[in-house]
Image (cartoon, rainbow, N blue to C red):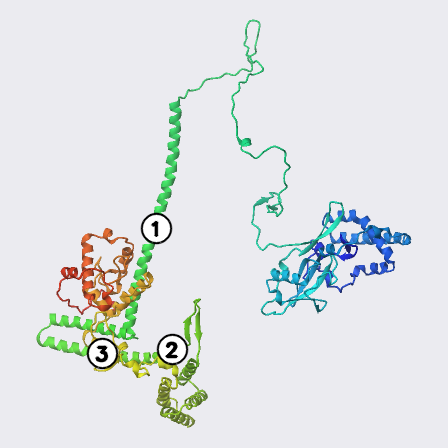
Amino acid sequence: MSERGAGGDQEVPEDEGDNAATANPQPGGGTAGEPPEDDREPGRPAPGQAAFESRLSTFTPDVLEAAEEAETQADLPDHAEQLGGPQTAENVGNSLETDCTDVRETVEEAETQANLPDDTKQLREPQTTESVGNSTATVKLVLVPEGHVMTVAFAIGLSIQELKSHLASELRVPVEVLQISLDGRMVEEKQSLMELGVQPHGSTRMEMSSTEPNAHPLRPLRPPEHDHMPDVITVRVQRDDGVFQEVVVEIERPPQQKAFMGGYRHRLTGVEYHHTAVQTLPKRRPDRGVIVFSRDTQTVELKSQAQQCPVNVSTQMTGIGCYVSCVNDKLVVPGNYITADEYHDRRLRAVICLQSFARRWLARQAVDRLRRERDRRLAWLELQERRRREEKEEQLRDRRQRWMNPKRSEDLNLLYHALEKWRCEEEQRINSSLQGAERKAALCLLLEQETQLIAAIGRHRIAVQSNNYDKAIRNFLDKSAAPHQWRAADGRLIEMDSQHTVRARELRDLYNNVSLPTASQEQRLHVLMTLKHTVKEHKCQLTRDIVDLIDREVDLMTRGVKAASLEGLRKRISTLFLQYIKTPAFNPEVAKLLKVPQNPSQLKNDMFLCRSCHRYRRSADFSLAASAGLIGQCRDCAGLDNIARSRNDFSCYKNILRRLRADEQELNERAKIPFLLQAEDVRYLVEVVWASRSALHASSDLYNLVFVRWERKKDWSPWNCILLSKEETSAHLEVLDVHEAYEATFIRRIEHKHMLARRHFSHIPVMAEYLDSQPAATLGNQLVSKPITMTVKHATDTTPASAR
């Protein structure tokens, strides 16, 4: 089917958008039953028009021109009626047959008048180039290689460069990467669509590709399967002079979703009708010459006017000469008269009744709310109590597990502390109940039992050391093989492997393979050969010893020696290879992990003398408290002295310090004082200053005591703290002003303990800068200059004997 354009006489193929309302569109703009019209070769007719065009080719040009003009004059009203409503496929087919019949009749009439002078050519005015250039045409672009089709209405007088600019803005790609081709050849940017042979209101098909498909691929912003309307439609409108003109309209799809503005629903059918917003302005009402929207029209004027009834009304009753029937009369009985006071009193009682019911309902609501809050409070208290009970049980289980299976030095200190406590109780019982020779015999038996228990703990220590040695070796190798890590500006964790970390990772994997106890003979030989080739890269006495041991084990394995007999030899190989790994010359990555630095200049100012073992050690081997003035014993000597004499357990104080640091870190990231204190300082605060008891209820369970701030607005310090149990902590932290919440006697007792702590830590140079600006004389007057003796014994443990 073809239609005539408004500005020319040449037939143009109708755009596929006209049929989009009745057929399902396929990629490329066609229907499912017929291929797209623009996919055909240029100049090739449609299959349904081949016979008709072959017949038209037999007529002369003059006959065809006259027939076309007559057809245009005759069919204008018919086309207007057809385009007024939607067409179906059957209507389109009938219109095609009707058009063909009309054209045949018109052609036959034109043959008889072929010799007449062609006046129609003289009546038509030729179109100018400018008016033709402003005409639009449908341009279909195939995006290569995806195959998507874009349809654009474009003026044929514009250049290809302007078309590229428009498409680049639509596809969001640079203009420079776009290439447009027509029939397989590239199109110059200066050419226009009219120069390429595109007729007004016609259509053409081009291919568009990208010079950089990886960086700037060509993809439509909206997938074709989401579109339910064509990109371009052809509308036939009637101008003022009565002539119909075809206008190509490009459909613009807004990127946002229209807002829902309500609607209606049919009660019977259930069909919903939604309100919608339109883009056209409302129709302007004609001016009636009267101002309607003004304040005067909305103002009411009041005036008084007397009215007189135009009809006189009168009543009549029975009298002389006049009878009035009383059939329709009504008997009116007066009721009880209600005074104004009675009326208002009745209204008041009704209002009181309503208020009583309303207040009853409000009271019920309030009582229900209080009941829910009470239940929630009781449930929260029960949850807190259950959590504290579970935490206490977890502490007991953990302590019992540490007693039964010690794995760290703190666990062994806990055993020694329990041993010392048992010895003191037994010695006190013997001294109070026995005398003379019986007492000496009991003390000797007690000493023998203590010796056996110390030997058992020593065996546990040896087993723990052997297990911890293997774990320490694994951790050391993992640290040396770990990649370098740092945080980027955007917070991402960046990891980098260097040649040294790769070397350390290879040596770690080889050590793990060498240390495997359950390996077959073939696997063991393969691992030994790999180890031999690895260590032979460096020639020294250590590598020669490793190679000799490897050759010895290979020789024994070939002789059929059992694996149990080779355990010692394999242990020597693993030990020498570990020494090889710890050598910085063979594994440079371990230099930063060795305790003894390779540069002797680093030991110049970092070596100190231990007063117990009289050996020089590094500063990291000493554990100094904040109140320590001189460097005394190293860690090993301090641990040995604790086992031999006092047998104290610092795990509870370490737990208090660990929790204190975690809480202060959450409140203030710049907190420093909790990180300057050590376990010995916390022990001094707990035992000497606070007497190992809670300040409120005197709880003596060290595993249930914590340090919190005395005043919430100030940072934690030994002179701004209070020792409480875990149950009391939550209540104290909710206090805004301690001077209003606590009594004056309790406040003075807490301030006295703060002055004791201030006096103890005031002579420490590191802690002195954090002291409050309080005169030193005031401290000297308020505090007693008597020296404080620190007790060594723990507070009485409330743990039952069955738990031990």
Q: Relative to 462, is 58 on the left or the right?
A: right
Judge whether residue 110 can be spotted in this image: yes
**Which one is earlier in the sequence, the residue at label 2 or at label 1?**
1
Residue 718, percent from left and from top: 23, 63
Judging by the rendered image, the residue that carries numbered circle 3 is 637
Residue 609, which numbered label?
A: none
Residues 164 and 432: in front is 164
Residue at the spot of label 2:
479
Q: Position of residue 786 (x, y in %)?
A: 12, 65
Residue at image coords 14%, 76%: 443
In the image, what residue type sits under mark 3? Cys
Q: Which residue is mark 1?
A: 375
Distance from the alpha carbon under mark 1 to that under mark 3: 57 Å
Kind of residue at disc 2: Lys
Asked which secondary structure carries label 3, the reply is helix
Using the numbered discs, state the Cα–Cα distance from disc 2 to disc 1 in whole angstroms: 53 Å
- Residue type, numbered disc 1: Asp
Point out the residue furthest to the top here. 320
Choose between 76 and 449: the one closer to the eye: 76
> For numbered disc 1, what is the local secondary structure?
helix
Say which label, 2 or 3, has the lower sequence index. Answer: 2
Tell me the distance, in whole angstroms, between the alpha carbons under discs 2 and 3: 28 Å
In which quadrant of the rendered image does the N terminus lie? bottom right
Q: Is residue 288 above or below residue 757?
A: above
- Category of crowding for the residue at label 1, using alpha-carbon neighbours closer than 10 angstroms: few (below 14), some (14–19), many (at least 20): few
Whole-percent x, y for residue 250 in the image: 67, 55
> From the viewer's perspective, is residue 139 above or below residue 547?
above
C-beta proximity under 8 Å, tags 2 and 1: no
On the image, the x and y values in percent for residue 657 come to 27, 66
Q: Earlier in the sequence, mark 1 or mark 3?
A: 1
